[in-house]
Image: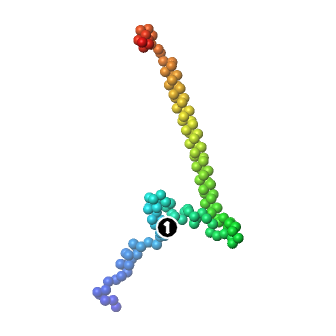
């Protein structure tokens, strides 16, 4: 039999449990790292990620792991994309420069074909 003076803990524990979460601390401190020019997740790049985990006792390197190969392919694809975008940008700049040059030539042509003053006004301009 419960005493009348003791509170029930069930509802209070339920309220407390809602304030806790069980998610990982994957991005803890990520704002600080981004603010200081570091990657959001320190495990995404660096020596511990890029170097092999082990090597043979005689000094031969270990065969590349699947994750390492995946990261290499991802980097290659990024380089291909950068090269493609760079060439597209260069092509666009050349087209724009040609268009600007054509516009200037057209304006110069219009200026040359303009009607010229005659008579008295021509003599005043030459003085």
x%, y% of residue 28?
46, 66
x%, y% of residue 103?
52, 29
From the viewer's side, name the closer residue of 30 and 24: 30
Q: What is the tally of numbered marks visible in this picture?
A: 1
Classed neighbour count for the residue bearing mark 1: other residues with Cα under 10 Å, few (<14), some (14–19), many (≥20): few
What is the residue that sits farthest to the front in this orientation?
58
Figure quadrant of residue 50: bottom right
From the viewer's side, name the closer residue of 117 and 46: 46
Q: Is residue 79 above or below residue 91?
A: below
What is the residue that sits farthest to the bottom in this orientation?
1
Answer with left or right where residue 108 lies relative to residue 1. Answer: right
x%, y% of residue 29?
45, 65
x%, y% of residue 43?
54, 65
Answer with left or right where residue 39 lies relative to residue 50. Answer: left
**Quadrant where the N terminus is found in the figure:** bottom left
Q: Residue at x 42, y 12 (%)?
A: 127
Q: Residue at x 59, y 43 (%)?
A: 87
Answer with left or right where residue 106 lies relative to residue 35. Answer: right
Q: Residue at x 47, y 14 (%)?
A: 116
What is the residue that sits farthest to the top in this orientation?
119
Q: Is residue 9 above or below residue 118?
A: below
Q: Is residue 80 above or below residue 126?
A: below
**Circle 1 is placed at which residue position?**
26
The secondary structure type at the circle numbered 1 is loop
Q: Residue at x 54, y 29 (%)?
A: 102
What is the residue that sits farthest to the left in this orientation?
5
């Amino acid at each position: 039999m419960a005493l009348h003076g003791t509170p029930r803990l069930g509802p209070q524990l339920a309220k407390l449990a809602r304030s806790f979460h069980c998610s990982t601390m994957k991005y803890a401190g990520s704002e600080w790292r981004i603010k200081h020019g570091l990657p959001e997740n320190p495990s995404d790049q660096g020596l511990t990620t890029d170097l092999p985990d082990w090597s043979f006792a005689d000094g031969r390197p270990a065969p590349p792991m699947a994750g390492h190969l995946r990261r290499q392919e991802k980097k290659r694809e990024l380089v291909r994309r950068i090269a493609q975008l760079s060439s597209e940008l260069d092509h666009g700049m050349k087209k724009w420069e040609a268009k600007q040059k054509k516009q200037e030539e057209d304006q110069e042509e219009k200026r040359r074909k303009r009607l010229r003053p005659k008579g008295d006004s021509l003599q005043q301009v030459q003085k």
